[in-house]
Amino acid sequence: MILVYYFVIMNILAFITYGIDKARARKGQWRISEAMLILLAFFGGALGASLGMLIFHHKTRKRKFFITVPLLLALQLAFCIFALYQNYHLTVSSHEVDLGLSRELKIVQVSDLHNQFFGLHQERLLKMIEEQSPDMIFVTGDLIDSSTHTSYSLAMEFIRGAVKIAPVYYVTGNHEVRLEGDKLHSCFAEMESLGVNMMDDRFIEYDEYIIAGIADISLMTFDKYEPFDDSKPVIMLAHEPQYTGLYKRLGADLVFTGHYHGGQIIIPGVGALITPEFEFFPAIYQGLNDYEGMKYVISRGLGNSAVPVRVNDYPEIVTVTVK
């Protein structure tokens, strides 16, 4: 959505600027430089500049403009189509893990939504989740974005739809930590009223397994409970994947994480470009992985935060069939 806002602003600015310059030309007043008019088109305002040229009949006879501006418009339209596809082409990644349960358990993981918009009331996303027929839905943090497009309503639209599909389990991410305040607590209270299992620093024991969660703020100083024994498999929710040693120490058998956004840009034959911790070319950045026998999932997530770019890194929901 950040790219959309940027292009809307730049094109409105370009259109207005071309209109102002035309009005000044008619009155013989001081003019806006041609370099500035071209720069506005170059930096994303080519559509506004083109409309300004047509509607105000401005610069239409100048070769510099009637060739350059349409060319920039074509390039920017191609870029927008590419960027929208890269950021909104929803995919499903499926994995299987054997924990020795007596019946299969299908988990759908949603991570790093960051208030991304997937149709009215998040219909596209919710439909894709429903098609997986999950037994439970894990939300592993950064449901709400704290930096550029915070929207509690978008987050709650997803939650209201998700709880109608399957039981929802939720842990916070680093963006929820930054949003600490009354609005966030009201949002959490509504989530609880809808039946969401708030898993920050707590666990729920079932007949054959334990579901545990760790709040993002607790990852560096976690001391809420001692390691689980080996009597039952432990399925854990956390936001950040780099704490594998902690998850292993606590006795986790299967961990769901996100946070890395798939490295933002995946270079064919090379891998991911960068993590939020500014680690370039990380060895592990997505998928099902193994750490000393513990399985852990890193979801590429669904949205973006400050950097609105995904290349070869389609947003995903993750399904894990626990055997």
Image (cartoon, rainbow, N blue to C red):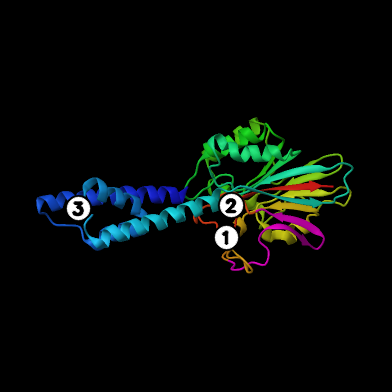
Pointer 2 residue: 174
Name the image quarter holding residue 61.
bottom left
Q: List x then y, in percent, for residue 150.
A: 49, 44
Q: Are marks 2 and 1 in contact (CB under 8 Å)?
A: yes
Q: Magenta stretch: give its range.
A: 279-299
Mark 3 / mark 2, whichever is N-terminal: 3
Residue sitting nearer the eye, 175 or 75: 75
Residue sitting nearer the eye, 297 or 213: 297
Q: In front of the other: label 1 or label 3? A: 3
Q: Is residue 172 above or below residue 288?
A: above
Pointer 3 residue: 21
User: Does the segment drawn in magenta span residue 293?
Assistant: yes
Structural crowding at the residue carrying mark 3, measured as other residues with C-alpha within 10 Å and reported as few (<14), some (14–19) or many (≥20): many
Residue at 78% in and 56% down: 295
User: Does the segment drawn in magenta span residue 286?
Assistant: yes
Q: What amino acid type should be assigned to the residue bearing mark 1?
A: Pro
Q: Is residue 93 above or below residue 263?
A: above
Residue 88, can we see it? yes
Distance Cα–Cα, label 1 vs label 3: 43 Å
On residue 276, the disc is: 1
Residue at 60% in and 53% down: 314
